[in-house]
């Protein structure tokens, strides 16, 4: 009786296990999640909607030809700037470009400018965000599965 290889080679399987144990997969999943969330945040700005789908209150003096909070696009650029490390990802640029970004996200009492959140809050992810981010994580991890 002789042994023959069928299926994926042992070297390929071992390399895949290394990716899962050395943090490569975790990093790639974090990048996939960040890119997916980045697209959702941009869509929220374009549609003037919070992550839960709630429309933002319009500006007192609407700006012709553009969505709320998109005059210079600095806030959306800052809101979608992310960093990835061994712990995951974080959107880190809001206050670097526009101090009012954190004000729109904050739940602090307000008298003049209404809240216009662009990140999910403590209520958690909406169904749409859950689906998009789940698919992004699956796609990133799938790239490390041997075939």
Image (cartoon, rainbow, N blue to C red):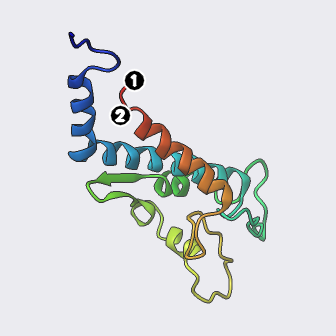
Residue 112 point in image, percent of width and height: 68, 83
Residue in the image at 73% along x and 67% along y: 56
Marks 1/2 in contact by CB < 8 Å: the verdict is no
The residue at the point 39 percent across, 23 percent down is 147
x, y percentage for residue 26? 33, 48
- Rendering quarter of residue 55: bottom right
Q: Is residue 98 left or right of residue 115?
A: left
**Left or right relative to 64: residue 116:** left
Residue highlighted by disc 1: 147
Q: Relative to 6, is 77 on the left or the right? A: right
Q: Mark number for residue 1?
A: none
Q: Position of residue 130 (x, y in %)?
A: 60, 56
Q: Is residue 8 left or right of residue 58?
A: left
The span from disc 1 to disc 2 (Cα, nearest Å) is 9 Å
Report if residue 72 is visible in the image: no
Residue depicted at x 53% and y 52%: 37
Secondary element at image label 1: loop
Examine the rendered structure and indicate whether residue 58 appears above or below residue 133: below
Which numbered disc covers residue 144?
2
Q: Is residue 115 visible?
A: yes
Q: Nearer the viewer, mark 1 or mark 2?
A: 1
Give x and y (percent) for residue 120.
57, 66
The residue nearer to you, when weighing 52 against 41, is 52
Asked whether 44 or 29 is in front, the reply is 29
């Amino acid at each position: 009786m002789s042994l023959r290889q069928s299926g994926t080679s042992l070297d390929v399987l071992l390399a895949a296990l290394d990716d899962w144990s050395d943090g490569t997969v975790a990093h790639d999943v974090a990048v996939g999640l960040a890119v997916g969330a980045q697209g959702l945040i941009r869509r929220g700005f374009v549609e003037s909607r919070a992550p839960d789908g709630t429309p933002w209150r319009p500006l007192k003096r609407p700006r012709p030809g553009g969505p709320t909070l998109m005059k210079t696009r600095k806030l959306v650029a800052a809101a979608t700037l992310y960093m990835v490390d061994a712990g995951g990802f974080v959107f880190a640029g809001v206050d670097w470009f526009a101090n009012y970004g954190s004000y729109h996200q904050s739940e602090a009492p307000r008298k003049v400018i209404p809240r216009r959140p662009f990140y999910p809050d403590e209520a958690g992810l909406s169904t749409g965000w859950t689906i998009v981010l789940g698919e992004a994580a699956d796609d990133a991890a799938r790239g490390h599965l041997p075939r």
